[in-house]
Image: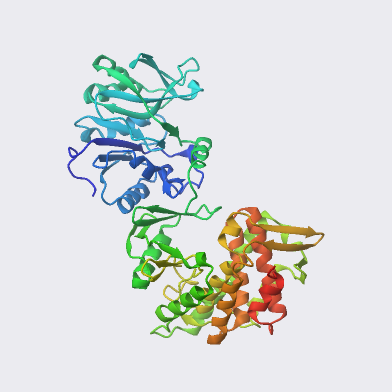
Amino acid sequence: MTGGDCNVGPLVVILAAGQGTRAQIFGSWLHKGLLPLGDRPVLTRLLDRLPSHAHVVFAIGHLGDQLRSFVKLAHPDLHASFVQVERYSGPGTGPATSLLACRYLLNRPFTVTAIDAVYDETLPAPSGNWIGVADVNDPENWCTVRTDGSRVIDLAYRDPEGTSLAYTGTAHVFDVEPFLSGLETTVQDGEVVLDPGFLNLREHGLEIRRVAWRDAGNEQTYEAVRSTFGPETTAAGKTNDLTYLIGDRVLKLTSDPDIAEQLFVRGRALGDIAPAVYGCSGGVFASERIYGARVIDSFDPTEIRDCLEWVESRLWQQPKANLDPKQVRIAMRSMYIDKTLSRVAALLNRLPDLDEIQSINGVKCAGIHDLLKLVADDASGVLSGAVVTPIHGDLHAENVLVDQSGTMRIIDWRTDFGGLPDVGDLTYDLAKMIHTLEFSTPAMVEHHFSIDRFGDAVVLSHQGIRELAASRTAFWSFIRSRGYDETRIVIVDALVFLSMSPLYDDAIGEYLFLLGKVLLASAIGDTDRDGADLFEQLFPTR
């Protein structure tokens, strides 16, 4: 819950108003407290170190609405209040300014901490007056503490002659008024800091407490901390969205709040074939966490077939209302031509010489724009051959889970298809399914691939060909049993790889582009060949 009686449980203030300009690893759209550490953000790891029944006061400013939305959706049981700090940047601002903004709530002893502090242990007990310290080698970068035993004598602000004990950003204040009155007195380097408040506490007894602390407040220190946590749930290289697993919830953060809203609306419409959706606000979307195995993980071709048949029965149904054919064609062009051209342009802007390669795995390839013009001219029926139905939009085998009861559920659905909110081209779902059976996500993000160059020719190879061969066979068997257009599936599959290419680092992007290009050239050049044969000829199972 939020708000309520501030006298319930230990009182903790989290200082979260600053702009975080030193740690904009993911760009300016993301609050510094929501940077990832493994599958959870900095903030959640901080909350884990607080008493479970604490009343947490957030001093918010920059991106405050995003942080508030995240707390409410990710931690719905947290007893929280939010205080808007009106001035949070420029001279005369700082941690003391934020604390003074919260003054009306600080009617009893409280613990204070910076939001970008990472603690490896539970914080010390909230009793007496103490400040948390840790050893550092660069006192000029910190507020350091001089002590007599455990008692605080003095503090030095960014002094090269300071001690090796640095204030870590956390403290407990028992004598509230002397502390707060001290905050109104001193500005250092344009920043209103907490030091004068601590100095006022010396006569009331101020001690140190050693804490297991790491700073995540700038890019260098954050990356050092980040490297010690497990893998993230967001694909490597992406910076415009993040996914977190917190308790029984999945949290998605996007740089575009409209996308989060659309995810919520579509999730509600999908019903029980998808996780329950809990809410959306400020670019944050929350849904139920499904505990189960991904279909891709079993390497079981029967499960691939079962998955396709299940989606067919539960999702791929003809829409109740007929759509204007012109509207459908506009959506097809938007997804298959306009998006691909835009994405390819973004990659070639980074790697301008990449399209000069003329041969890939023995297949002569025209320039990508010539190939895409052939698709746009619709000789292969990519634009005119749409099978319009409700779709998932990112239906690969990693986005279908099987829970302990054997029930399948879909996750990570697309918000729309070329502007169509509820339906799309069934072929797009099929292409998404086959693309991860051809080039798996682990092989991609772990760089289990190679590009061997021979002048203007290259040979591509990647791991996972053999392991997924039977699953690919099962996929194409299903396609043939339903009479779907195999060539069209391969072409859309190629467009998927091309569109993915600029979303990742240069090594992955280069491979995705070349893989998509050779599939496209092969499918356009030999429309009579079965879809399965195209990939297997290019990447024979060894």
Report whether 428 appears left or right of 214: right
Q: Tell me which colouring the rendered structure shows.
A: rainbow
The residue nearer to you, when weighing 47 against 329, is 47
Q: Position of residue 4 (x, y in %)?
A: 19, 45
> How many numbered marks does the figure carry?
0
Give the x, y percent position of residue 199: 32, 17
Q: Residue at x 80, y 62 (%)?
A: 456
Q: Residue 124: image x %, image y %?
A: 31, 30
508 is higher (above) or lower (below) than 490: above
Q: Is the residue 444 above or below the residue 341 in the image?
A: above
Q: Quadrant of residue 436?
A: bottom right
Q: Is any atom of residue 224 visible in this view?
A: yes
Which quadrant is the C terminus positioned in? Answer: bottom right
Say if 149 sits above or below 18 in the image: above
Q: Say if residue 390 shows up in the picture.
A: no
In the rendered view, does 49 fall on the left or right side of 481?
left
Image position, residue 187 (x, y; %): 38, 23
Name the residue at 56% across, 75% down.
333
User: Which quadrant of the figure has residue 47?
Assistant: top left
- Considering only vertical position in the picture, is 396 above or below 71? below
In the image shown, does 211 or 155 lie closer to the viewer? 211
Task: Write the residue at 22% across / 24% down.
Answer: 177
The single residue placed furthest to the right in the displayed view is 455
